Amino acid sequence: MTGYVTVATAYVEDVLLVDRCLTGEPAATRELFRKHQRRVHASLFRVLGSNRDMDDLLQDAFLQVFQSLRGYRAEASLATWIDRVAVRCAYRYLSQRGRRVQTAPLVDEDAPIDGPTTGRQLARDGVKKLYAVLDELSPAARLAFTLHEIDGRSLAETAELVGSSVTATKLRVWRARKKIEHAAAQDPVLSQYLNPVLAFEEAP
């Protein structure tokens, strides 16, 4: 019963917050942005890596959210609905950029390094190589792979966010894995980085 009440309360809070935003209440728009900013930024970061357009993309995602709020039907949680909008923005960005993204490392390059073979150094080099391979994927495959494997979402949730079937999403993830696995077989640094990170599966 407690879980049901919690979900029902969150649902009501979502609807009331959207209604307040639609009436033009500034405090409500700030509340919605603060409540969802960190999660959306984290997801975009994992899809795209750190790049020079991240702040603009985050602003674009929330601009689309506020422009589309009248279309929110409360059929899913507000968080899920916002995530769908953000995923569409990421897909459009990847498509318009011809797939390649100006990706920077996901770790701090200015952090001190204890030695040439430290875990931090491996992570730094491995991430660069992983995102270089991701740059070669189609926007749909990149979204499916990063949302499922890096952002940690289930196949069902990933499929819902990208607007595809679970079967098609699973196939895209598997193909992306195979491409990354092939690249790792030829690159010891990428292979060493991926071993504890990804567990490659057999074809669906």
Image: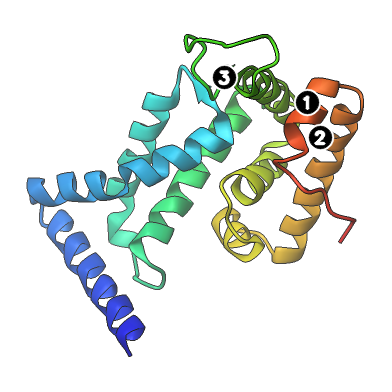
Whether residue 17 is visible, yes or no, is yes
Q: Which residue is mark 3?
A: 105
Q: Residues within 10 Å of mark 2 (few under 14, many from 20)?
A: many
Marks 1 and 3, the one that precedes in the sequence: 3
Residue positioned 81% across, 50% down in the render = 174
Percent of width and height locating residue 10 = 27, 71
Outermost residue toward the bottom? 1
- Pointer 1 and pointer 2: residues touching (CB < 8 Å)? yes
Residue positioned 38% across, 25% down in the render = 56
Q: Amino acid at mark 3?
A: Pro
Q: Quadrant of the N terminus?
A: bottom left
- Relative to 34, 42 lies left or right: right
Whether residue 98 is visible, yes or no, is no
Percent of width and height locating residue 21 = 16, 54
Q: Say the numbered circle drawn on residue 180.
A: 2
Q: Amino acid at mark 2?
A: Ile
Is 91 drawn above or below residue 109 in the view shown? below
Q: Residues within 10 Å of mark 3 (few under 14, many from 20)?
A: some
- Secondary structure type for disc 3: loop
- 130, 98: nearer the viewer: 130
- 56, 41: nearer the viewer: 41
Q: Amino acid at mark 1?
A: Leu
- Pointer 2 and pointer 3: residues touching (CB < 8 Å)? no
